[in-house]
Image (cartoon, grey):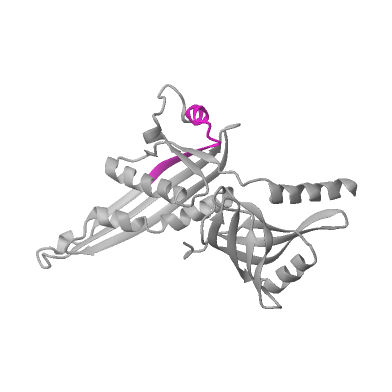
Amino acid sequence: MKRNVLLLCLLLLISLGVPAQKHTIYADDFSSEIKVPNRVLTTIRAAFIDGIRNTNRVKIVDALTAGPDLSLTPLEDARRFGAEYLLTGKLLNREATDDGSSQRRYHSRENSFKEKFKLRLDLVRTSDGTTISTKNYEENGSASGKDASQFTALEHSLLNIPYQMRQFVENYFKVYGSILKIVTDNGKKAKTVYINLGYDDPIKEGLRFDVVEDGLIEGNYIENKIGEVRIEKVMGPKISLCKVNKGGDVILNALKNGTSLRLISRQAKLFDE
């Protein structure tokens, strides 16, 4: 029992006092199992890398600009840069079609293109070389009209990648924090709160968190989700203002009773910024 209580106290101290760490990913050059124009592979890679970088959750070391040591394996090169993770990508297939070509003598100004590809993304932990994530991404897009091109169709096939990469980062690089105090309430529910995360942490405005109350049931550590908050404004190195989206009444009562509430970043939604 004492051991479980000590574990609970340790977890609370971690969430309250330890700053969130921004992990480093070494992004290797992407490869392809099929022959494709270099511009196509470069464009696809850029969309995936930018999608991860724009989450502000991790630091990206880009092999194409960092100067890889070609005598080393990608894993060894990632370790050379002090990265905790290695990201690799392989284009598995691609279909590029020009649906308007057969009709041009009748519709000389109409172009119609379609693009479809499948890419495998691997995330490797550099400390032991273990692949912790392997996922295939299948995307498609189209473009039509006088100024349409195959490259435009390719760009349209990449429109969903920022959302996909937010999900990817959220799955493997969560952020933890805690609520500092209530800022505003209506007497029944907390409306806004301060949290202990800010400029120094891998966060940005719009990021959502589950609010969790820790406890013990018959010696077993539990996490009880009681609400949700969303960052409205990053105000300093270790402080941000959040709007309470759910559970304002429970959050208000818990904090009034002196209960420490932890935060765990949650899964991205399609229209999150």
Total tally of numbered discs in the picture: 0
Query: What residue is at 71 percent from the left and 78 percent from the top?
Result: 187
Q: Is residue 74 magenta?
A: no
Q: Say which of 266 and 202 sits in front.
A: 202
Q: Is residue 92 left or right of residue 180?
A: left
Query: What residue is at 45 percent from the left and 47 percent from the top?
Result: 53
Magenta extent: 75-92
Q: Say which of 265 and 231 sits in front.
A: 231
Q: Say which of 54 and 69 sits in front.
A: 54
- In the image, residue 265 lies at what x, y percent? 60, 56
Q: Say which of 48 and 61 sits in front.
A: 61
In the image, residue 233 sits, relative to residue 134, either above or below, namely below
- In the image, residue 215 lies at what x, y percent? 80, 58
Query: What residue is at 38 percent from the left and 49 percent from the top?
Result: 47
Furthest residue in direction top, as rendered = 71
- In the image, residue 38 lies at what x, y percent? 28, 40
Q: Is residue 30 left or right of residue 19?
A: left
Q: Is residue 20 left or right of residue 101?
A: right
Query: What residue is at 52 percent from the left and 39 percent from the top?
Result: 24
Q: Is residue 76 magenta?
A: yes
- In the image, residue 180 lies at what x, y percent? 68, 59
